[in-house]
């Protein structure tokens, strides 16, 4: 007999016995309220059983994830294992736990392969390649995944990258605190006003070199790879809001062809006489 059916049958029988032991003595003393007592006696246990059926059983999704993590199952990295953003916290926790386990047991080949596939699904191809190399060195190779990883990394290698350097004048630097936000973003010259790549730094890092690529895309539908000409803007914001630039602490480049291998040089603040000397 099915264990679930047996469990529920025993539950119903036990509830019925409990109800009879409680209800009959009460009815004998309060005959005028018999209907009300029976209604309560039936409704409460039925509601309790229904609530348990919905909430009381172990969650199959969490159990499946834990089981796959423990056994190194490959289904963890399938799309079914990550329904939109619902399980982001669970996935992040699982990845952190797997990373920690591999630090203490670096010879776990299945663990490295699982971590590589998880990284790949999360859009971290470089980390995936490192983890897979460890798995392969330990004798755990997956040719299909390896081919997919090579294709992904090849596509990333040819994706455009805009490199630049941001400097600031002494007079302008005196207006900044080390924690002030600096936003660097690319916008299409012929397209929507929404930036297509955004990078955030802090004033304490100045001067610094930067890179903008598809990794900083605001939307998968609009990125550097799908844009021909852009302008690069560097903006200081003391509030941390990218839309609120400090007066005089914003600079915009000339139009840049995305495919050109050039270094974009941006300078915040007009040069003071001491800078010129």
Image: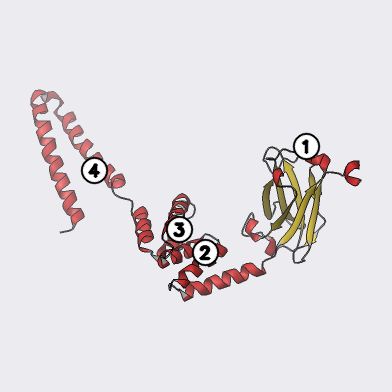
Q: Nearer the viewer, mark 3 or mark 4?
A: 3
Q: Quadrant of residue 41?
A: top left
Q: Residues within 10 Å of mark 3 (few under 14, many from 20)?
A: few
Please, what secondary structure does the residue beneath circle 2 have? helix
Image x and y of residue 124, in percent: 55, 61
Q: Please tell me which residue is depicted at 71% across the width and 55% down the height of the picture.
A: 210
- First-in-chain label (1 vs 4): 4
- In this rendering, the answer to whether 140 lies above or below 63 is below
* Residue 175, disc: 1
Q: Which residue is mark 2?
A: 120
What's the distance in space between the residues labelled 1 and 2, CA to CA? Answer: 43 Å
Dot placed on the residue nearer the N-terminal end, 3 or 2: 3
Residue 113: image location, x then y, percent? 45, 67
Q: Is residue 188 visible?
A: no
User: What residue is shown with label 3?
Assistant: 103
Quarter of the image where the N terminus is located: bottom left
Residue 36, x across and y down, in percent: 18, 29
> Looking at the image, which residue is at 83% across and 56% down?
254
Residue 138 located left or right of residue 221: left
Which is more N-terminal, label 4 or label 3? 4
Q: Which residue has dot 4 on it?
A: 49
Between the residue at mark 4 and the residue at mark 2, the CA separation in whole angstroms equals 43 Å
């Amino acid at each position: 007999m099915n264990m679930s059916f047996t469990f529920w049958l025993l539950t119903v029988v036990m509830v019925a016995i409990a109800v009879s032991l409680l209800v009959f003595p009460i009815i004998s003393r309060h005959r005028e309220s018999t209907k009300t007592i029976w209604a309560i006696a039936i409704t409460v246990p039925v509601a309790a059983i229904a609530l348990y059926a919905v909430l009381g059983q172990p969650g199959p999704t969490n159990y499946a994830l834990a089981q796959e993590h423990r056994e190194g199952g490959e289904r963890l990295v399938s799309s079914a294992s990550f329904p939109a953003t619902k399980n982001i916290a669970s996935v992040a926790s699982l990845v952190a736990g797997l990373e920690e386990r591999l630090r203490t047991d670096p010879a776990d080949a299945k663990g490295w392969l699982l971590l590589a596939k998880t990284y790949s699904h999360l859009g971290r191809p470089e980390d995936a390649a490192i983890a897979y190399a460890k798995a392969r060195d330990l004798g755990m190779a997956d040719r299909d995944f390896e081919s997919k990883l090579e294709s992904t990394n090849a596509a990333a290698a040819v994706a455009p990258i805009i490199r630049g350097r941001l400097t600031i004048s002494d007079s302008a630097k005196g207006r900044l605190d080390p924690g002030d936000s600096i936003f660097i973003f690319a916008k299409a010259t012929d397209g929507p006003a929404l930036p297509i790549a955004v990078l955030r730094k802090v004033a304490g890092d100045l001067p610094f070199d930067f890179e903008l690529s598809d990794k900083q895309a605001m939307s998968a539908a609009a990125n550097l790879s799908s844009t021909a000409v852009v302008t690069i803007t560097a903006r200081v914001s003391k509030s941390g809001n990218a839309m609120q630039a400090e007066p005089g602490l914003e600079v915009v480049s000339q139009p840049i062809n995305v495919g050109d291998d050039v270094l974009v040089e941006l300078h915040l603040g007009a040069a003071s006489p001491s800078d010129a000397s």
